[in-house]
Image (cartoon, rainbow, N blue to C red):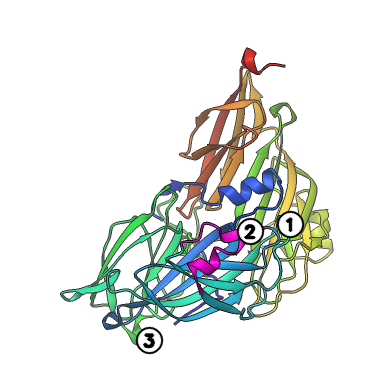
Amino acid sequence: MSRPFTPVIAMFMVVLGGAALGAQEHAANPSPSPTRQTESDEYTRYELLAPETASFKIFYEVTATAAGAKVYFNPIRKGSTASDEAVYDAMTGEPLRFEVVPGAEARKDPLMVDADPAGNYIKVQLARPVAPEGQGRLLIVKTYRDAKSYYRDGDAIVFNRSLGIKRNSVVLPPGFELVGCNVPSQVLSEPDGRIAISFMNPSAGEAPLILRARPGAQTGPAAAPHPSTQSRSWEAPFAGETERQRLSERAHQDRDIVYFLQQPETHAFSLYHDYTESRPGADKYLNVVREGSSVSDPSAYVLDTGEKLATQLMTGAELAAAKIEADEPVKPATQVVLIPFPPVKKGQSIRLRISETYTAPVSYRLDGEDLVFDRSFGRPRNAVVLPTGWYLTASSIPAAVAQLPDVRIRLDFWNARPDSIDVLIKARRRIVRPDKAR
């Protein structure tokens, strides 16, 4: 059963990476509109069809980020025969106009001067030009026939394909059980009982995925999994995640958070987090400020359109008095940022960028000459940018490290597990070289 607009939300190990580095760097360091096509937040879902077809259906979620772009080009992979293409605007759910064009024609567009002249591309007419520092979210659906990637090996089926997209899931055909997977992955059950394999690949290269499956899985109503519960692990020495949280697809979660540390004497850091709301009827976002932090300067806008949204800073007591329910217990003195927006319609979604400044003396401080940032991250993808003039000396959790154009250091943390990671970062002030001094 295909689910193009239903979030598959929610690996076995903590991983790291920076696949969205380009788009987030742009937000940290605004620059003139890009002259090349850029994208972020890619996620691909492969549904393997009957083995004799050597075909699989692809649901590709991608966000166009080149400011002002009116079109988006999606390459058709060489060696695959594409059919049944369709493209949808993720915000409205409405179909978009598209055509398949040769690479030579794609190269005529200023955004695609590097297009492969020997390839083919799906050229999509976006629903609206990409707003400055905004996004154009798409769902591209297509079926590939590729006997070199999907084939039989005796009684087994094999899906052997190098995947360059960093977040992926592969759904086996009905009646097949997983017997081999070379990339550490989350294994989940679809509502109809099909087995899904999901993973995040934070490395710089492609993931050389090889899946093997054999007949033996139940089909029909008997294959449907029991609904996940809110029960927690009986072995955990603390109140861990619920079964529902542990069995949600981690790779498909779409909230990104970037922290920009100010000078440590201030104990302050600004941040933004991007969040997609797709629940019909949802009309507000509540950001409950964690204990030990205080918030200021909240702002928000719709990434899809650039529309600015109102924000309201409240306390838990004021929230209760207004009869506004939160998804978690809120103490009377706790700060809450309320962001209302038009109710989400069925089949549609809205993506928000929420920016705030936090002051947290315990989480962010100076210890002698050391900058110390000590904070728990619960989301799959988080990034921290050190303040100007500091170099990294320690990170407790593995991270991908990059230097931004303004020479600040950025750390990207990708956590494919369903639990939080406790990030401890230390840094020291750089020594100004004489040849760099003014």
The residue pinned by badge 3 equals 221
Q: Quadrant of the C terminus?
A: top right
- Under mark 3, the amino acid is Pro
Which mark is first along the chain, 3 or 2? 2
Which mark is first along the chain, 2 or 1? 2
Can you say whether 253 is above or below 97 in the image?
Answer: above
Left or right: 56 as drawn, with respect to 424: left
Q: Evaluate if marks 1 and 2 touch, with contact meaning CB atoms under 8 Å apart.
A: no
- Under mark 1, the amino acid is Pro
Query: Relative to the observer, which residue lies in front, 391 or 247?
Result: 391
Query: Relative to the observer, which residue lies in front, 198 or 32?
Result: 32
Q: Nearer the viewer, mark 1 or mark 3?
A: 1
Residue drawn at x 15%, y 74% is 154
- Under mark 2, the amino acid is Thr
Percent position of residue 133, x then y: 71, 55
Percent position of residue 159, x then y: 30, 68
Q: Secondary structure at mark 1?
A: loop
Q: Residues within 10 Å of mark 2 (few under 14, many from 20)?
A: many
Taking the magenta stretch, the answer to whether it contains residue 257 is no
Can you say whether 149 is above or below 312 in the image?
Answer: below
Q: Quadrant of residue 77?
A: bottom left
Query: Relative to the observer, which residue lies in front, 111 or 238?
Result: 111
The residue pinned by badge 1 equals 132
Query: Relative to the observer, which residue lies in front, 57 or 380?
Result: 57
Q: Quadrant of the N terminus?
A: bottom left
Q: CA distance from mark 1 to mark 3?
A: 48 Å
In the rendered structure, which segment of residues is drawn in magenta?
101-116
Tell which residue pokes out farthest to the top in this image: 434
Can you say whether 19 is above or below 106 in the image?
Answer: above
